[in-house]
């Protein structure tokens, strides 16, 4: 299982139900990494997507505790256990895509985390565990520094040691 996230310098990820900043290069990167793969998201993250619609070209698995929540075009699971049972052991192509609540419940199951680090800080109310403070994960790849709208950012791959 893998996770993919964009963080600021404080490992913050969101504010008021949305992203901190929209970087088209990062959205393109997210699409390239996840297209054709299974993505797992929380109900709030699904609702943050344009029109609250699932992302096309990949199965969208959504977690909610509301048994009546049945939006179109997604597979709904009402517990972590139900989802894990559905996934079985073949989780290589499963991407945990947020938000905070979901990342924190699945981070220990992830062997690879794709982190986009934005070299800026933003007001925020959601965060991701700081992988640089953990001794079980290491950086195994990084891209060149990107720049867009005067904002510098960089792609990293963290792998479980
Ligand atoms: N920077 C990034 O890469 C990134 C990526 C994704 C999201 N985000 C941001 O993160 C924020 C959203 O994060 P969030 O933590 O508020 O919400 P979230 O993780 O997207 O969704 C939380 C919801 O998921 C459901 N849920 C969680 N655990 C569950 C479980 N074990 N079983 C069944 N359902 C479960 C619950 O839905 P119900 O309330 O319906 O029961 C819960 O309210 C937004 O600001 C978004 O933009 C950032």
Image (spheres, rainbow, N blue to C red):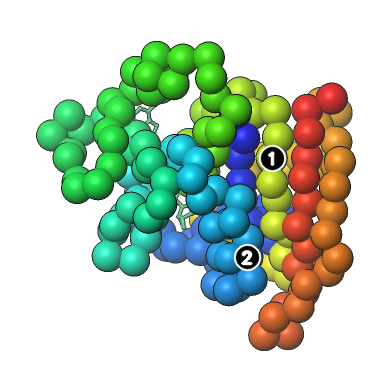
Name the outermost residue toward the bottom.
149
> In the visual, does 106 lie left or right of 73?
right
- Estimate the x, y position of residue 4 in percent, counting from the top left: 61, 46
Residue that badge 1 annotates:
113
- Estimate the x, y position of residue 137 in percent, counting from the top left: 81, 32
- Residue at position x 64%, y 29% in the image: 110
Q: In the image, which disc is placed on residue 30?
A: none
Quarter occupied by the C terminus:
top right
Q: Nearer the viewer, residue 159 or 150?
A: 159
Q: Quadrant of residue 160?
A: top right
Residue neighbourhood size for the residue with mark 1, other residues' Cα within 10 Å, grouped as few (<14), some (14–19), many (≥20): many
Question: Dot 2 lies on which element?
Answer: helix
Residue that badge 2 annotates:
26
Name the outermost residue toward the left.
68
Residue neighbourhood size for the residue with mark 2, other residues' Cα within 10 Å, grouped as few (<14), some (14–19), many (≥20): many
Question: Dot 1 lies on which element?
Answer: strand
Q: Are marks 2 and 1 in contact (CB under 8 Å)?
A: no
Q: Nearer the viewer, residue 41 or 34?
A: 34
- Residue at position x 19%, y 46% in the image: 71
Q: Is residue 15 above or below residue 91?
A: below
- Estimate the x, y position of residue 119 in percent, counting from the top left: 77, 68
- Residue at position x 58%, y 65% in the image: 28
Q: Which comes before the other along the chain, label 2 or label 1?
A: 2
């Amino acid at each position: 299982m893998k996770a993919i996230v964009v963080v600021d310098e404080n490992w913050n990820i969101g504010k008021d139900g949305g992203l901190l900043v929209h970087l088209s290069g990062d959205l393109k990167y997210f699409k390239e990494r996840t297209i054709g793969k299974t993505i797992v998201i929380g109900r709030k993250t699904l609702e943050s997507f344009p029109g609250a619609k699932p992302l096309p070209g990949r199965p969208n698995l959504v977690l909610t505790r509301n048994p009546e929540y049945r939006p179109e075009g997604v597979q709904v699971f009402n517990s972590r256990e139900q989802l894990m049972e559905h996934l079985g052991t073949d989780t290589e192509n499963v991407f945990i895509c947020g938000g905070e609540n979901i990342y924190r419940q699945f981070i220990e199951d992830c062997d690879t985390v794709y982190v986009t680090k934005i070299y800026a800080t933003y007001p925020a109310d959601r965060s991701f565990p700081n992988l640089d403070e953990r001794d079980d994960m290491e950086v195994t790849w990084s891209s060149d520094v990107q720049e867009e709208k005067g904002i510098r950012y960089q792609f990293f791959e963290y792998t479980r040691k």
